[in-house]
Amino acid sequence: MGSRQELIGWVNELLHTNYTKVEQLGSGAAYCQIIDSIYGDVKMERVKFNANQEYEYVENFKILLNSFAKHKIDKPVDPTKLIKCRFQDNFEFLQWLRRFWESYAPSTGYDAVGRRQGRAAGPVDTRRPISSASSGRGSSVGAYRRPAVAAGGSRAPVSARAPVRPAAQTGQQVAELSRQLGEHKVLIETAEKERDFYFCKLREIEMYLQATEFSAGSELESMAKHIQGILYSTEETDAEAAQMVQDEYQDHQQASQHMDEEETF
């Protein structure tokens, strides 16, 4: 849906950015803010808009995936493909994201610049992010660092050039962050399954109590009220109400015990 120019124009209009290519979205920063324009709860202060390292891209996608999990968005996302800043992978994902935005975005306006606290946003570089194999690229926006040239036009000695980041370091960081992403995804899925399981059990109890008629003033009625008090209580608003139900139940128990003692005599 939409050409590359149309999609980039939509992104720039929504986020007040100046992207020129779909590949530049591979940093993940724009994707995070597009989701924020729908739900308004992405931690934008953690999004790295000037990222130019692979591990920074991975951090952005970690924020994106956390938002997907929070809002139960079941779209599969493979950060290892998107962060390579290839056109086709990012184009297909952007097409889906545009359709998703059109379905769920609120009709109210979105303050993109305010949400990112006035920080400039993209593009950083039209090429791939700096990785272990990128020894000639600088860290400045959209810049390419040429070898130093000494007086007279000859290149400076290798020893005089800027030190290169160890190749294994960046690769290990990306691998570790990818591993953490996988672990977080499994933990979130497990927690959601357990939550849904116990919610269904509690819902069944609630429906049973609502559908069953108990004799007025009976012990079963008091017990049912006590259980409902537990079900409906929260830490802030209904704690006192739950305590009142529990007190009533205890009073009823004491009254019943007193009546049993009188009948014995």
Image (cartoon, rainbow, N blue to C red):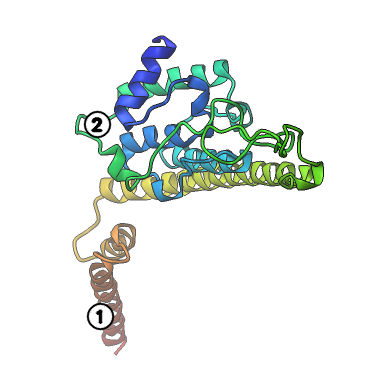
Q: Is residue 202 left or right of residue 173?
A: left
Q: Dot 2: few (<14), some (14–19), or many (≥20) neighbours within 10 Å?
A: few
Residue type indicated by callout 1: Ala
Residue 72 visible to an observer of this rendering: no
Spatial CA span between label 2 and label 1: 57 Å
Task: Identify the element where label 1 is drawn.
Answer: helix
Q: Horizontal and vertical percent for residue 217?
A: 20, 66
Q: Is residue 52 left or right of residue 172?
A: left
Mark on residue 53? none
Q: Quadrant of residue 84?
A: top right
Residue type indicated by callout 2: Pro
Question: Nearest the camera: 179 or 168?
Answer: 168
Residue placed at 42% from the left, 25% from the top? Answer: 19
| Residue denoted by label 2 | 106
Q: Horizontal and vertical percent for residue 230?
A: 33, 62
Q: Quadrant of the N terminus?
A: top left
Question: Nearest the camera: 253 or 144?
Answer: 144
| Residue denoted by label 1 | 255
In this figure, what is the number of numbered marks?
2
Q: Horizontal and vertical percent for residue 29?
A: 46, 36
Task: Identify the element where label 2 is drawn.
Answer: loop
Q: Horizontal and vertical percent for residue 229?
A: 29, 62
